Amino acid sequence: MSCHPVTAHLLLGCVLALVPIVLTSNIWDLFATGYQETPFEAPGTTSNIRTIVIDRCRQYWSLHPEIGERDCNAIWEELLNAVQGKDPCGITEEDYRHLTEMTAERIPCDKTLLWSRTNKLVLQYATESDHFLTLAETLLGFMFNELIWCGTTLGPGFNFTACPAWDECEYNSIQSFWKMASAAFAQESCGIVNVMLNGSAEGDLVKKQSILRTVEIPNLDPSRVSEVKVFVIIDKEEEDKNSCGSKSLMELKNEVEEHHMTYSCIDNFRIFD
């Protein structure tokens, strides 16, 4: 519409007529930018996440044909269905159950490697050695490792602006995913289950709220797991600050034995000597 500065009455009418247009434009901007009612602390969904996940899925299957052919597009759709249109702080482990079932694979006995507070060292060691297998080296872990995603209640799809940080809310999309993935990995483990802990870290070697103690150990099957073997590892450039006799490891030992499994611990294990 066009407005001519003829009278104050006509000018007021022009301003009022423009108000709905401005409001509509602002609302559209909120949807287009992934606006959320709650300002989350972490970055938004990883750019090009669909392409990354499907490419990783196909790459993994080409390297491990023994797992059988998988429908990578269907796996992607299952992730989308688990979170889209939902509150990013209202995603539970159950939302990912079907996804973990679609990606299940056999874990060779004696090769499971769990860890806490040693991520980079463990992944480096596991990559260079064929003795152990981490969650990140399974199909499910490989596809989603180090990616971020969350949905939005404002519509379908993902929020690319911001997502909840790991500890920002209890049922966020990333924490719930890794808890479910970790539980599935533990349930498939057999024989000796290996655990690597950072003896150079400050404080408790393995915290009470860690996934290792709250998810993985409780989900090990005592009828299939013969032993939980802990390695307290020391980076060759770091100081030895913890040992098998530390308080948190004594607690872990009790938890393993209460779960009717054998426990052992090796001190000062230097993996890159």
Image: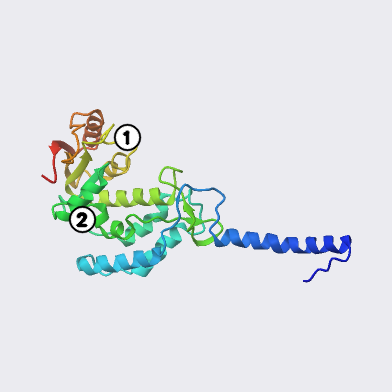
Measured from the top left, where is residue 191 in percent x and y?
A: 15, 48
Kindly report which numbered mark, 2 or 1, lies closer to the viewer in this rendering. 1
Residue sitting at 84 percent across and 62 percent down? 11
Q: What amino acid does circle 1 point to?
A: Lys
Apparent side of residue 77 relative to residue 208 in the rendered image (left or right): right
**Disc number for residue 208:** 1
Can you say whether 269 is above or below 177 in the image?
above
Q: Nearer the viewer, residue 232 or 114?
A: 232
Residue sitting at 33 percent across and 62 percent down? 102
Furthest-bottom residue in this view: 1
Of the image marks 2 and 1, the number of the one nearer the N terminus: 2
Q: Residues within 10 Å of mark 2 (few under 14, many from 20)?
A: some
Question: Which quarter of the figure has residue 54?
Answer: bottom left
Residue sitting at 21 percent across and 33 percent down? 253
Q: Nearer the viewer, residue 96 or 161?
A: 161
Distance from Cα at disc 2 to Cα at disc 1:
26 Å
